[in-house]
Every structure is written in C-alpha cells, then in structure tokens.
Amino acid sequence: MDRVFAEMEFLARSANRGDVLTLVAEAPHDRGALAAETGASQPTLGRILRDFEERDWVRATERGYTATATGRLVAAGVTELSESLAAELHLREISEWLPVDDLGFDLKRLGEATITTPTQTRPSAPISRVIELIETADRVRVFSHAFNEQTLAAVVEWVADGGQFEGVFSAAAIDAVAHETGLRGQLKQLYAADDATIRVIEDDIPLAVTVADDTVSLLLRDEQGRLQAAVDTDDSDVKTWATARHSDYWASARPLDETDLAGDA
C-alpha cells in the first residue's frame, strides 16, 4: 500500500503529469503537441516523459509518445478520480440532502448539474427554477410526494397554453391540495384539461422529480421538510433513470378521480 500511495503522490504533485498521461492514453502526441495542450515547458515535459518511461507507462513511437497498457490503466484511474472529485466538490454544499438510496445513477452524472438554493431575498428560488424549466418545455413528467401552490398554479397556466403534463403524486400530496379551497379549484382545472393527466399512488414517493423535455430536476429537502435546493441536469443517464422511474410509478398508480377532488367540500 505504501508503494500505491507513493505513486498517487507522484501524480498529485503535478497537474501536468495527469494531463500528459491522459493525453497520450487517448492518442499519440509529440512533445510539441503536449506543450500546446498542457502549457508545460519542454524541460518539464522532458522530466515527466522520462519518469513515465521509467514506470513503463509510455513509450516513444514514430507518431509520438503513446501510453502502454498499464499507462492506460493508470490514466483511466486518474480520469475517474478527477471526475469523482470534481462532482463531489460541486455537490458538497447539498450532499447531506441528496437521497442517494433512491437515485439509480452514478452521482458523477450530477457533476455539472445546475444547483439552485434559497437565498434571503429569494427563499423560493428552487421552486422558481423548476417552474422556469416547466414553462419552457413542451412535455413535462413529474413524480412527487408534494404538489406545492406555486408549481400547481404554473402548471395550470402552462397546460392552458398547450403544454402536455403527466404527473404521478402520492395520495397524501393530492389530499393536501384537495383540502385547500383555492388549490382544489386549480387541481380541478388541471383534472379537466385535455393535455393533463394525473395519477395517484397510495404509497409514499420519496422523491420530487420533474422531467421537462430533456432536463431532469430534483427538489431536495432536509429532514424537517424544508426546501434546500433544486438540482437540474440534461445528462442522458439521469434522464433515462427519471423516465424509467416515472413509467414505473405511472404503471402502478390509478387515475385521479372525482373522489380525490372532494376535499372538505
């Protein structure tokens, strides 16, 4: 293990080392090309390449320096670690609220996600971000444990303008809306709309996910139910997971009916 840590330290001491190894693992590069892409000086590149040759990570060919099989193995590890650390740094502020047990994709897929958090002047900024995504989409699919007032009002207006809405909500979420007179009226409007379909599932839905065309948004709450962030991405793996999860909930849910809309009326 000491040798492993020594090699990790060797790579970590210089960002150029990781960059050079990654480049020659992708394709042969001569020293001029490596200098252009890394910004490293020729003396620095000379030292790096000699060190790599001593480890049998690279070899010189007529086309330039190229990685050996073991060099490609190390380069793949460097890339994976770099992506993992970049994603962790990006998500660190909201990591405690990520429902990792319910997410069916690698968290690295959120490494470039847009994160919107509440501020003192915009406490509902995460909700506003989701509404923004809805209002610019043609088709929206949702599965959620809640249907908040702002989103409901925005969806009603958006559907009236031609948007297509397919939502799956927990029975508790629908019941909460139906027991508020104003919200119940909006829910009835959505229920009657030709381009909106709502289904209800009796079990709890642990997530609040919106798929607006090709963008997936997750609303994150803390243990007290306070909204902490909206995280949205157009990553294809995340969309595949979200659409599959929506389909699963959709298949096991029942259609919203008149009795769900009764509330206290």
Image (tube, rainbow, N blue to C red):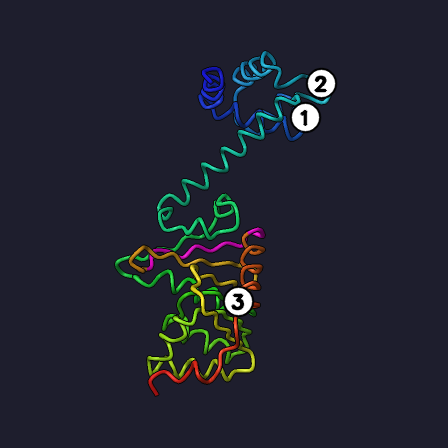
**230 in the magenta segment:** yes
Residue at left offset 37%, top offset 70%: 148
Q: Which residue is mark 2?
A: 61
Which residue is nearer to you in this view: 187 or 35?
Answer: 187
Q: Position of residue 179 (x, y in %)?
A: 34, 80
Q: Which residue is mark 1?
A: 28
Which residue is nearer to you in this view: 189 or 248?
Answer: 248
Main SS of residues in magenta: strand
**Element assignment for label 3:** strand
Magenta residues (range): 227-237
Q: Which residue is mark 3?
A: 141
Residue at left offset 46%, top offset 53%: 102
Count of numbered labels shown in the rendering? 3
Q: CA distance from mark 1 to mark 2?
A: 8 Å
Q: Position of residue 70 (x, y in %)?
A: 62, 21
Q: CA distance from mark 3 to mark 1?
A: 46 Å
Q: Position of residue 229 (x, y in %)?
A: 37, 56
Query: Label 2 near label 1: C-beta < 8 Å?
Result: yes
Which of discs 3 and 1 lies nearer the camera? The answer is: 3
**Residue found at the far bottom of this picture:** 265
Q: CA distance from mark 3 to mark 2?
A: 53 Å
Which of discs 3 and 2 lies nearer the camera? The answer is: 3
Which residue is nearer to you in this view: 18 or 229?
Answer: 229
**Element assignment for label 1:** loop
